[in-house]
């Protein structure tokens, strides 16, 4: 094991402990890319409705943690805070004065999951709408096409 020098101890005392991948942590609101379940950009978070994919992941992974960009208005973030509260998921508002990330929301685990596709590109229709399309009328069941 490597012995720490006096200079290293002083540097950590002045600037804080050494951190792995600081640029990645700044971009992804304090977490690492390998831990992310799903991520949204600021413009996606600013939309009026909640992304159903995010709600689905929250429902499936209650041990996850929600990171929200604190540089955005609370009115914009409140719908996701309410969703996290509904599924009993811890959430954190991350405000970095030095670096403003284009990421608005990150749902992450506390361990590496290495999910390849973390960004949501399009909004899936609500689950209720899908169920309505699946249920057909009485006559369609009798007269199958």
Image (cartoon, rainbow, N blue to C red):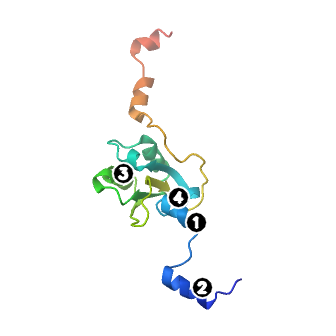
Say whether marks 2 and 4 touch (CB < 8 Å): no
**Disc assigned to residue 80:** 3
Tell me which corner region of the image, top left, top right, bottom left or bottom right, holds residue 140.
top left
Q: Closer to the N terminus: mark 4 or mark 1?
A: 1
**Disc assigned to residue 8:** 2
- Mark-to-mark CA distance, 4 and 3: 17 Å
Crowding at dot 2, Cα within 10 Å, few <14 / some 14-19 / many 20+, comes out as few
**Disc assigned to residue 111:** none
- The residue that mark 1 highlights is 21
Q: Residue at x 40, y 35 (%)?
A: 126
Q: Name the quarter where the N terminus is drawn.
A: bottom right
**Which percent across, then down, holds residue 115?**
59, 50
Q: Secondary structure at mark 4?
A: loop
Q: Secondary structure at mark 3?
A: helix
Q: Residue at x 40, y 60 (%)?
A: 91
- Mark-to-mark CA distance, 2 and 3: 41 Å
Q: Residue at x 34, y 41 (%)?
A: 49
Q: Nearer the viewer, residue 74 or 82?
A: 74
When the figure is inspected, residue 128 is found, relative to residue 77, above or below; the finding is above
Q: Closer to the N terminus: mark 2 or mark 4?
A: 2
- Mark-to-mark CA distance, 2 and 4: 31 Å
Tell me which corner region of the image, top left, top right, bottom left or bottom right, holds residue 71.
bottom left
């Amino acid at each position: 094991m490597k012995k720490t020098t006096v200079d290293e101890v002083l540097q950590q005392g002045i600037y804080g402990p050494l951190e792995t991948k600081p640029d990645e942590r700044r971009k992804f609101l304090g977490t690492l890319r390998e831990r992310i379940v799903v991520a949204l950009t600021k413009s996606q978070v600013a939309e009026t409705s909640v992304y159903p994919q995010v709600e689905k992941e929250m429902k499936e992974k209650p041990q996850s943690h929600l990171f929200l960009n604190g540089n955005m208005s609370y009115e914009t973030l409140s719908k996701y805070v309410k969703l996290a509260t509904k599924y009993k998921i811890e959430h954190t508002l991350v405000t970095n004065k030095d670096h403003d990330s284009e990421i608005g929301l990150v749902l992450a685990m506390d361990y590496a999951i290495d999910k390849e596709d973390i960004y949501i590109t399009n909004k899936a229709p609500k689950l209720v709408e899908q169920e309505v399309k699946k249920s057909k009328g009485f006559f369609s069941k009798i007269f199958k096409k």
